């Protein structure tokens, strides 16, 4: 009685060379090998829930608390500023007074304005100063 050799990778997947039509050599396997999957051994990434927070840099704070200091400096120096309002208008003057909710913009030759802060898009410093 003949004993079969134990299966080895070398025995099972030995390629046989056969000559096809036209003199082209092709490789064939005695037994078909399982399909090759490129990343089969790589673990899958865990799915993030939409509510999970994204790690990385922390976002900038909503408030820097520099508003009062800036308005105070502009008022003391009587710097000319341009105030762009939410409706698109731009007014110029210097900041004489400010509080939590509004600023007073003093202008020459035209009436002064009390402007609510929630109506201001931005305040830009102009080049010159009043003094």
Image (cartoon, helix red, strand yellow):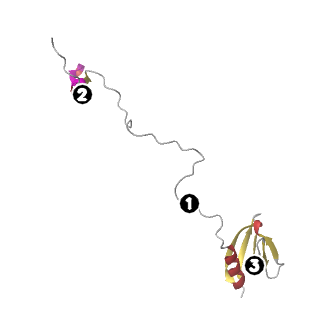
Q: Would you place residue 45 above or below residue 87 in this image?
A: above
Mark with earlier residue (1, 3): 1
- Residue 9 tag number: 2
For the question of whether residue 100 can be seen, the reply is yes
Q: Secondary structure at mark 3?
A: strand
Instruction: Give the residue at x 73% y 72%.
Output: 83
State the extent of the magenta-drawn residues as a range.
Answer: 11-21
Task: Report how far apart the C-alphas of labels 3 and 2 lie in the structure.
Answer: 88 Å
List the residue tagged with mark 3. 93
91 vs 59: above or below:
below
Which of these two is toward me, 71 or 9? 9
Please state which of residues 30 and 81 is positioned toward the viewer in this rendering. 30
Where is residue 44? Give x, y as percent.
45, 40
The image shows residue 6 at horizontal and vertical percentages of: 21, 22
Q: Nearer the viewer, mark 3 or mark 2?
A: 2
Name the residue tied to disc 1.
58
Dot 2 falls on a residue whose secondary structure is helix
């Amino acid at each position: 009685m003949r004993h079969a050799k134990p299966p080895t990778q070398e025995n099972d997947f030995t390629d046989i060379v056969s000559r096809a039509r036209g003199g082209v050599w092709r490789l064939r396997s005695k037994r078909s090998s399982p399909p090759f999957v490129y990343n089969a051994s790589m673990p899958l990434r865990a799915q993030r829930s939409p509510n999970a927070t994204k790690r990385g840099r922390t976002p900038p704070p909503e408030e820097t608390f520099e508003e009062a200091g800036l308005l105070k400096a502009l008022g003391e120096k009587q710097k000319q500023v341009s105030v762009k309002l939410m409706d698109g208008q731009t007014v110029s003057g210097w900041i004489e007074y400010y509080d939590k909710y509004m600023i007073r913009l003093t202008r020459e030759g035209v009436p002064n304005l009390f402007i609510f802060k929630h109506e201001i898009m931005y305040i830009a410093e102009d080049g010159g100063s009043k003094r």
